[in-house]
Amino acid sequence: MTTTKPLLKKFLLHDIEHYSKSILMQDIFYKILHLAKLDSNVILVGEIGSGKKRLAKVIHESSNRAQGSFQTFYCLNINEDEYKKAFWGHLKFDENHLSIKYDLLEKTINGTLYLDQFSELTPKLMHDILISYKKGCDQIFRLRPSHNGKPRIILSFNQEYYQNFIGKPIWQELLNELNPVVIMLPPLRDHKEDIPLIIDHFLNEIRDRYIEYKNLRISGNALLACYNYDWPGNLLQLKNAILQGAVLSRGETIELSHLPISMNTE
Ligand SMILES: Nc1ncnc2c1ncn2[C@@H]1O[C@H](COP(=O)(O)OP(=O)(O)OP(=O)(O)O)[C@@H](O)[C@H]1O
């Protein structure tokens, strides 16, 4: 029987003894475990800081492409030149030989290309990237038939924009070109039962990294406040809050007063 245990360990990246208490997350891990081996393209939908990039890496590492490269292309605020540089072929002269190189696509042909914050792009740029991806892969195959394959594409979609895309022509184009599986990542407030486990992970990370923080703890009150808070910035915000608490507590016990003010006023 397939188990989500090793995957969850990888997701949290440390050797935990207790596993996600959330049915929602268990369901996601179960899907990911099967999806990773299928080699299909993926759209990860989630709120800011909810762990989309982390999940993309887990998919890559759990897939048959794990030995290939995982590359991230940040779509936030890119302009046309940047996207052309990344996706278009360019001439390269080496050892008296002139060839056309597609850097990003060639690097990931046996691996995974993660397009972070893809939903921030204009529909035109989305369309251009899709076309460049398709043409680039065809061209690479024509020039170097041994490079038979395509990068696995994982797109990150901000939850806020996701609803607006459905039904738009560009959404249909995405589905036609990539035939992706869509995974919805829940916000942290929908799997609060994992908060103590996740905090424990962040505390361990800090203890391991800084010797002067090796006694770092969190008080019951502070933990309760973390549990009761809604975390609009999700895991990223929680991680920053714990880091702030670690600094203000000088590596001892994180109290409620060491956590960000915004949490106390809720
Ligand atoms: N399961 C997890 N266990 C431990 N840390 C995690 C986990 N998921 C995410 N993180 C941490 O939380 C932070 C945010 O995660 P990540 O960058 O994957 O989120 P994101 O949804 O891609 O963010 P954004 O919306 O800004 O692109 C990172 O610092 C990451 O290391």
Image (tube, rainbow, N blue to C red):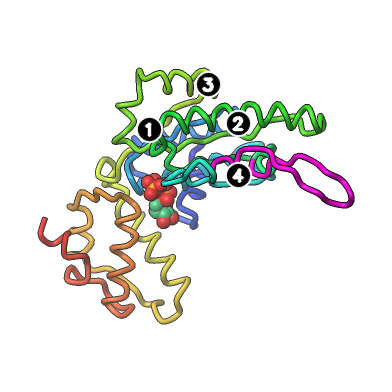
Question: Callout 3, which amino acid?
Answer: Asn
Question: Callout 4, which amino acid?
Answer: Lys
Q: Residue furthest right?
A: 96
How many other residues sit within 10 Å of disc 2, few (<14), some (14-19) or many (≥20)? Answer: many
SS under mark 1 = strand
For residue 246: magenta?
Answer: no
Q: Where is residue 99 in the image (x, y as percent from the top left)?
A: 80, 41
How many other residues sit within 10 Å of disc 3, few (<14), some (14-19) or many (≥20)? Answer: some
The residue indicated by pointer 1 is 184
Structural distance between the alpha carbons of marks 3 and 1: 16 Å
Q: What residue is shown at x 52% (from left), y 30% (from top)?
A: 128
Structural distance between the alpha carbons of marks 4 and 3: 25 Å
Position of residue 220 in the picture relative to residue 97 (left or right): left
Q: Which corner quadrant of the image does residue 149 belong to?
A: top right
Q: Which of the labelled discs sits on residue 133, or is there none?
A: 2
Question: Between residues 83 and 231, which one lies in front from this camera angle?
Answer: 83
Evaluate whether residue 34 shows in this view.
no
Assign the N terminus to one quadrant of the image: top right
Q: Position of residue 93 (x, y in %)?
A: 81, 49
Give whichever of discs 3 and 1 has the lower sequence position: 3
For residue 87: magenta?
Answer: yes
Question: Callout 1, which amino acid?
Answer: Met
Structural distance between the alpha carbons of marks 3 and 2: 14 Å
Q: Which of marks 3 and 1 is in front?
A: 3
Give whichever of discs 1 and 2 has the lower sequence position: 2
Structural distance between the alpha carbons of marks 4 and 2: 13 Å
Q: What residue is shown at x 48% (from left), y 26% (from top)?
A: 181
Instruction: Examine the rendered structure and indicate whether residue 72 appears above or below residue 14.
Output: above
Question: Between residues 147 and 168, which one lies in front from this camera angle?
Answer: 168
Q: Which of marks 4 and 2 is in front?
A: 4
